[in-house]
């Protein structure tokens, strides 16, 4: 293995801060959504992905990928959402093997109700904590990291 330079003091602060955010922010956003509108962050993300999809539906594998969840976790989550009338699930008309999840009108209504709570949580926990002048640089840096991670699957 090639010699790797240690992190600089600034890189170390960045890395440790990023890891704290990665570990704690999802739990906080989840807690905020559950408390205010009764859905988890994974449920919110799933409903959002479906709302943005053509026809408000996606194959389960594509939905799992879009929501960054395992196929088995997405199956359980969609089954739970279906039991609450927020989505439907049916066999794919294209190949009959896969399943397709579709957002129901009740699911869209739930998403619309949750959106202001989600937005308030994100603002309070992230954007209200940083100087607005730093957001563009941070967005660019994080976008570059995300793009490289997404392309190296």
Image (spheres, rainbow, N blue to C red):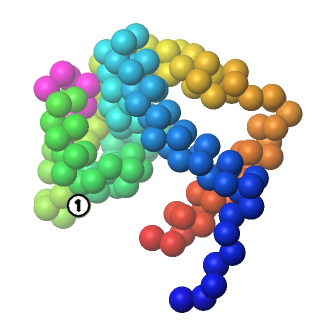
**Drawn side of residue 141 relative to residue 25, left or right:** right
Residue position for label 1: 94
Q: Is residue 63 left or right of residue 118?
A: left
Q: Give the x, y percent position of residue 134.
A: 81, 38
Asked whether the viewer can see residue 100, the reply is no
Percent position of residue 38, x then y = 31, 15
Magenta part of the chain: 83-89
- Is 95 situated above or below 124? below
Give the residue drawn at x 80%, y 46%: 137
Point out residue 128 in the picture as x, y percentages from the top left corner. 70, 21
Closer-to-camera residue (131/4): 4
Q: In this view, does 1 lie to the left or right of 12?
A: left
Alpha-carbon neighbours of circle 1 within 10 Å: few (<14), some, or many (≥20)?
A: few
Q: Position of residue 143 (x, y in %)?
A: 66, 53
**Nearer to us in this view, 7 or 148:** 7
Quick one: 130 or 136, which is closer to the camera? Answer: 130
Residue at (59%, 48%) from the top-left corner? Answer: 16
């Amino acid at each position: 293995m090639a010699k790797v330079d240690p992190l600089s003091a600034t890189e170390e602060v960045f890395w440790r801060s990023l890891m704290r955010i990665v570990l704690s922010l999802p739990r906080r956003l989840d807690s905020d959504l559950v408390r205010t509108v009764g859905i988890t962050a994974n449920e919110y993300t799933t409903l959002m992905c479906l709302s943005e999809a053509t026809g408000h539906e996606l194959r389960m594998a594509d939905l799992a990928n879009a929501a960054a969840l395992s196929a088995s976790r997405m199956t359980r989550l969609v089954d739970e959402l279906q039991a609450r009338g927020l989505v439907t699930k049916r066999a794919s008309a294209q190949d009959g093997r896969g399943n397709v999840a579709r957002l129901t009108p009740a699911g869209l209504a739930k998403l619309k109700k949750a959106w202001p709570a989600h937005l308030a949580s994100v603002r309070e926990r992230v954007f209200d904590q940083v100087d607005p002048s730093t957001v563009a640089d941070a967005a660019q840096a994080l976008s570059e990291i995300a793009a490289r991670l997404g392309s190296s699957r």
